[in-house]
Amino acid sequence: EVQVVESGGGLVQPGGSLRLSCTVSGFTFSNYWMSWVRQAPGKGLEWVAHIKGDGSEKRYADSVKGRFTISRDNAKNSLYMQMNSLRGEDTSVYYCLRDYGGIWGQGTQVTVSS
Amino acid sequence: QAVVTQEPSLTVSPGGTVTLTCGSSAGPVTSDLWPYWYQQKPGQAPRTLIFDTTNKHSWTPARFSGSLLGGKAALTLSGAQPEDEADYYCMLYGGPRVFGGGTKLTVL
């Protein structure tokens, strides 16, 4: 069974950092581009970043460029998002997404507040 | 970066047919942009209904279909059910990933 499971969300103060993780199973992780997508309360979906299967290409939304870093460890079937200099507008549910075929995780909540 | 446009809201009667569309400010949507369609119900994660323009997952109800229509990607629902009431998002995969703003579909 194909599964995507996020973890690492929580409450963080403005200016703080957080690292999200996503662990997958049921498919050959290294073959696929993977994305992070977020959704602010009451808002639509926003693509945040993605990374190629071998990690050689990464792209970011302008809203997070320079603050967020996407990475992966294919040996651990895991995707990561290091989030620095967090702002209130980063408050969202963050989803891990296998690009091809669109396989979604259940999401992890990130709240940036003092 | 292209802006992806969707109808903000649509209403369909139970058993009726409705078509949601997905356009791009960069020009006509073609199969080279590999349009995807996602469904999201309140309090739930999105799930993918259609990928690469027309392909369905095993969990995609047969009443949903994807196509290209008049320079846009289209999601057609034939025989709407109450459980189809949800938000629907498209995404165009060619180049930078951009979601449409979503369509709130009401079955009434």
Image (cartoon, grey):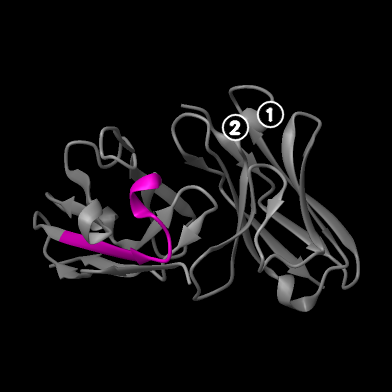
Kind of residue sitting beneath label 1: Thr
| Residue A47 drawn at (x, y percent) | 41, 46
Nearer to the camera, B47 or A79? A79
The subunit carrying tag 1 is: B
Q: What is the number of the mark on residue B87?
A: none
Is residue B95 rendered to the left or right of residue A75? right
Instruction: Residue at 23%, 57% (x, y): give it.
Output: A88
State whether residue A113 appears in this view. Answer: yes
Q: What is the number of the mark on residue B33?
A: 2
- Residue B30: quarter of image: top right
Nearer to the camera, B16 or A52? A52
Whether residues under marks 1 and 2 lie with C-beta atoms below 8 angstroms apart, the answer is yes
Q: Residues within 10 Å of mark 1 (few under 14, many from 20)?
A: some
- Residue A6: quarter of image: bottom left
- Asked if residue B44 is among those painted magenta in the image, a careful observer would answer no
Kind of residue sitting beneath label 2: Leu
Instruction: Residue at 49%, 59% (x, y): give it.
Output: A103
* Residue that carries the numbered disc 1 in the rendered image: B30
- Residue A31 vertical position relative to residue B95 in the rendered view, above or below: below
- Residue A25: quarter of image: bottom left
| Residue B29 drawn at (x, y percent) | 67, 30
State whether residue A87 appears in this view. Answer: no
Q: Which residues are magenta?
A: A19-31
